[in-house]
Structures are given as structure tokens and as C-alpha cells.
Amino acid sequence: MSVKYLNWAFSLLDFEPIQKVILLSLADNSDDDGVSFPSIRQVCARTGIKSRTTVI
């Protein structure tokens, strides 16, 4: 988890809530260089989003 990228994601204002929660999930999964490659299944599970299409 990179606190730097979590703070960055929280600071962004021009996102819909569903986009923001996906971005936060990616940021929470990122390393110190901002690299994040969780599976779609993992993002769905962590965010509670049921639709794979929405996450994609």
C-alpha cells in the first residue's frame, strides 16, 4: 500500500463516486512507484462492485 497514492486519489475531485472507489482500490494496491496490477476479481471484491464491466 502506498499512502502517497492513496492521498493523491483522495485529492482528485472530478470523478464520479464509482470511479473514485475503483481508483482508491488501485491506489491502495499500488507499490511506492504507483504500480498496481490487481485482478478485476480482486477489485470487484474489495469495492463491492458486482459488475466486471463497470470495473473494466
Image (cartoon, grey):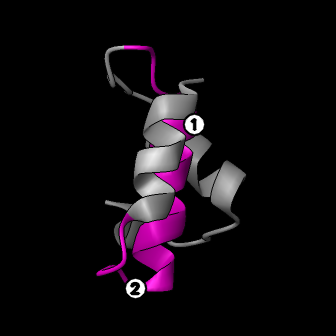
Q: Is residue 38 above or below residue 17?
A: above
The secondary structure that most of the magenta stretch takes on is helix
Query: Residue at the location (40% across, 72% down)?
Result: 19
How many numbered discs?
Answer: 2
Check disc 2 and report its element: helix, strand or loop.
loop
Occupied quadrant, residue 47: bottom right
The magenta-colored residue range is 12-32
Indicate the position of residue 33 as horizontal and vertical percent values: 32, 15
Q: Is residue 1 above or below residue 25?
A: above
Indicate the position of residue 35 as horizontal and vertical percent values: 32, 21
Q: Which residue is mark 1?
A: 28
Give amino acid for label 2: Glu
Residue 16 is labelled as 2
Residue 23 within the segment the image draws in magenta: yes
Q: Is 17 positioned to the left or the right of 44 in the image?
A: left
List the single residue furthest toward the top: 32
